[in-house]
Image (spheres, helix red, strand yellow):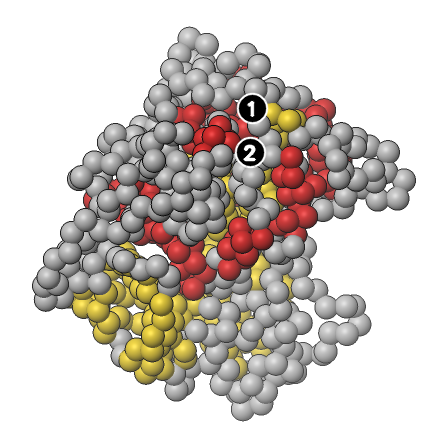
């Protein structure tokens, strides 16, 4: 859906702080119920067939897969209740300093041009807070009113501190005179810069010329200045989301589409691209339409990947996609944002992006504020306000409205959506292929690193229950499972023990079933804490192993007799890239104390990232050795290393595999 700024669009961004200042002076504390308007007798459940194939990987979750936006104007970010809520939702990736504020925010003084920055939520305060919960940031530097030098100074202060530091020092209280060694990896250059007036919308401050070429050339300048300070960082550029305004729009000052200009000019200087996605405009919200929009995601990713492949050349496969903002409506949030509908969309939205190869999705936002948006009776629920936040901030729609939200840090339904995602999978777990024969029943599945299989079922039907029959391929489940539930009238996630592969799911609900392996299934070994952000090597180079054992301590691999192993190899492919999944089984009678798999790519494939093993590549020859935690391979047991890779021309399957020097059968 076309995304354009409505007259209330500023509410989503940096001026939300004005509502907070006014409303926090009020003594009103009445919370409005956000439950359903209607309750109807439940008809007989409709049948649904869900299929899960654990042999087909859709990629591995990382600590940066699921994130949330924060804002420097948010005075509740560092509340202990707020930090605890973020931690309990499993969120490890937080964006700062917040949307359009980023383009008017000066980090060194903690000031916002024409706006407000919470004094405690300066850069040092923010980092102290998120480090206390084990999270990491993605930083958006000030493109709109800043300079390459200001951005480079921020990188220097954040990552290059220590003894002898002589770089920039903040002027706010609590800054460090010796800088920091945070090692912050991800840095964005501006926020939604196409909204600077280059086209018809103008909500983003930008003191440069308002053309796509100007932004593209400045991305190069910003990146060069920032990487001159720390060459290990990853720099991202703003792109338009395919099929969403202003994608494809041109004019006399910008005669080529935004993405064409930015990618063709700046791709050699960036490491990832940044689309934002809000599928509805204010006043046009529809629950049924919103819940169907995740069906657009695969096409959007495919188009964006094609553009990257067209303009980024040999670097294309290493360019990541980070969706650093998403929610249900582009501005003026209404009651849909605080109803049960939003977490249904949220979870389907997050998982569909991730399953299609996106590295990160960030919800807008942690706290926002009450907004007098769309309260049409055609939308589910009876709230008289909207709020983008996953947590309330206790504000009212105006100083005199008496329409107020709950006390600060009270969870909204979208918060529980994030908690349900955490029940489905966490860093190191593998997304696997799944499908449903009912359009109103969405399914996502994750093979967890501990060997469990989690299946999320989203019922988008407001009236009907479904009796879901699960068909599991490549996995034998135990009889009992844990069922996690969030739906109508829920005030928290509940869990129960259930039995069997046929389960009933209620209208407008999310159910996540977690199965343990049954008889004959081999649990996946539990790895140590995964590397938060795996490095993305330049195509053509050997990836740096993330878990290489100390030299001299690697045991000599136990010899394997010929024919005493089998390998199952599958891929999930997109233009120029793919995920490869390997299942290595010891079919012999002797346990292995360590293992090494070798194979040769028939084409031009290159490994760019691996997990559950240490991957190295010389030419077309690939070697995978056990990680420090999964070297033991008993007779009859399996290990499941996997990798992301690049390809050009074709992506043929390897024709032979050897384990510890002995040929394996291919199944």
- Residue in the picture at 71% in, 46% down: 183
Crowdedness near tag 2: few (<14), some (14–19) or many (≥20) residues, C-alpha within 10 Å: many
- Residue in the picture at 70% in, 64% down: 548
- Residue in the picture at 25% in, 36% down: 375
* Residue 563 position within the rendered picture, expressed as x and y whole percent measured from the top left: 51, 82
The residue tagged with tag 2: helix, strand or loop?
Answer: loop
Residue at the right extreme of this rendering: 164
Residue at the top extreme of this rendering: 252
* Residue 648 position within the rendered picture, expressed as x and y whole percent measured from the top left: 48, 44
Q: Is residue 204 visible?
A: yes
Q: What residue is disc 1 on? A: 115
* Residue 154 position within the rendered picture, expressed as x and y whole percent measured from the top left: 71, 33
The residue tagged with tag 1: helix, strand or loop?
Answer: loop
- Residue in the picture at 49% in, 28% down: 18
| Image quarter of residue 569 | bottom left
* Residue 261 position within the rendered picture, expressed as x and y whole percent measured from the top left: 49, 22
Residue 233 lies, with reference to residue 255, above or below; the image says: below
Q: Earlier in the sequence, mark 2 or mark 1?
A: 2
Instruction: Tell me if label 2 and label 1 are in contact, CB under 8 Å.
Output: yes
Residue at the front extreme of this rendering: 27
Residue 221 lies, with reference to residue 531, above or below; the image says: above
Structural distance between the alpha carbons of marks 2 and 1: 8 Å
Residue at the bottom extreme of this rendering: 589
The C terminus appears in which quarter of the rendering? bottom left
Q: Nearer the viewer, residue 271 or 541?
A: 271
Crowdedness near tag 1: few (<14), some (14–19) or many (≥20) residues, C-alpha within 10 Å: some
In the displayed structure image, the side of residue 214 where residue 42 appears, left or right = left
Q: What residue is disc 2 on? A: 73
Number of numbered callouts drawn: 2
| Image quarter of residue 425 | bottom left
In the displayed structure image, the side of residue 31 where residue 597 appears, left or right = right
């Amino acid at each position: 859906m076309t995304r354009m700024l409505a007259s209330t669009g500023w509410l989503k961004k940096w001026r939300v702080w004005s509502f907070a200042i006014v409303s926090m002076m009020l003594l009103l504390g009445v919370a409005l119920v956000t439950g359903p308007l209607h309750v109807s007798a439940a008809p007989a459940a409709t049948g649904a067939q869900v299929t899960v194939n654990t042999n087909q990987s859709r990629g591995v979750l990382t600590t940066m897969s699921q994130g949330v936006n924060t804002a420097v104007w948010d005075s509740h970010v560092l509340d202990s209740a707020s930090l605890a809520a973020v931690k309990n939702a499993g969120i490890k990736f937080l964006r700062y300093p917040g949307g359009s504020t980023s383009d008017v925010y000066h980090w060194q003084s903690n000031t916002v041009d024409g706006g407000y920055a919470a004094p405690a939520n300066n850069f040092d305060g923010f980092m102290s807070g998120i480090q206390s919960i084990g999270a990491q940031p993605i930083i958006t530097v000030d493109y709109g009113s800043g300079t390459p030098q200001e951005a480079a100074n921020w990188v220097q202060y954040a990552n290059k501190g220590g003894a002898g530091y002589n770089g920039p020092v903040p002027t706010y209280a609590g800054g460090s005179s010796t800088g920091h060694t945070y090692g912050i990896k991800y840095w964005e250059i501006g926020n939604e810069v196409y909204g600077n007036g280059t086209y018809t919308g103008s909500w983003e401050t930008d003191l440069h010329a308002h053309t796509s070429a100007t932004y593209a050339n400045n991305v190069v300048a910003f990146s060069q200045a920032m990487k001159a300070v720390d060459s290990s960082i990853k720099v991202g550029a703003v792109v338009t989301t395919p099929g969403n305004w202003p994608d494809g729009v041109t004019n006399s000052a910008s005669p080529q589409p935004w993405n064409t200009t930015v990618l063709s000019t700046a791709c050699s200087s960036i490491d990832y691209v940044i689309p934002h996605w809000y599928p509805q405009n204010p006043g046009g919200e529809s629950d049924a339409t919103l819940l169907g929009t995740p069906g657009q995601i695969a096409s959007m990713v495919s188009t964006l990947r094609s553009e990257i492949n067209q303009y980024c050349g040999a670097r294309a496969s290493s360019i990541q996609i980070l969706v650093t903002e998403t929610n249900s409506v582009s501005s003026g949030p209404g009651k849909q944002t605080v109803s049960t509908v939003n977490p249904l969309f949220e979870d389907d939205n997050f998982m569909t992006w991730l399953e299609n190869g996106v590295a990160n999705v960030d919800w807008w936002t942690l706290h926002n504020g009450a907004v007098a948006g769309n309260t049409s009776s055609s939308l589910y629920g009876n709230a008289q306000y909207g709020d983008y936040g996953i947590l309330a901030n206790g504000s009212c729609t105006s100083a005199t409205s008496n329409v107020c939200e709950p006390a600060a840090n009270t969870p909204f339904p979208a918060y529980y959506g994030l908690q349900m995602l955490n029940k489905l999978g966490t860093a190191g777990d593998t997304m696997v292929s799944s499908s449903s024969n009912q359009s109103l029943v969405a399914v996502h599945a994750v093979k967890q690193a501990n060997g469990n299989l989690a299946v999320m079922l989203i019922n988008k039907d407001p009236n009907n229950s479904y009796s879901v029959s699960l068909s599991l391929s490549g996995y034998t489940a135990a009889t009992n499972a844990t069922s996690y539930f969030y739906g109508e009238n829920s005030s928290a996630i509940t869990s129960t023990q259930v039995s069997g592969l046929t389960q009933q799911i209620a209208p407008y609900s999310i159910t996540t079933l977690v199965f343990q392996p049954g008889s004959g299934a081999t649990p996946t070994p539990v790895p140590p804490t995964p590397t938060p952000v795996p490095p993305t090597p330049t195509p053509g180079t050997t990836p740096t192993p993330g878990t290489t054992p100390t030299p001299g301590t690697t045991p000599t691999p136990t010899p394997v007799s010929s024919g005493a192993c089998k390998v199952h190899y599958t891929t999930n492919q997109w233009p120029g890239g793919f995920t490869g999944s390997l299942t290595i089984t010891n079919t012999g009678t002797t346990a292995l104390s360590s293992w090494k798999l070798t194979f040769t790519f028939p084409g031009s494939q290159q490994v760019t990232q691996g997990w559950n093993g240490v991957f190295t590549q010389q030419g077309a020859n690939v070697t995978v050795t056990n990680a420090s935690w999964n070297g033991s391979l008993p007779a009859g047991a399996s290990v499941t290393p996997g990798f992301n890779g690049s390809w050009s021309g074709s992506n043929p399957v390897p024709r032979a595999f050897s384990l510890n020097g002995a040929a394996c059968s291919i199944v």
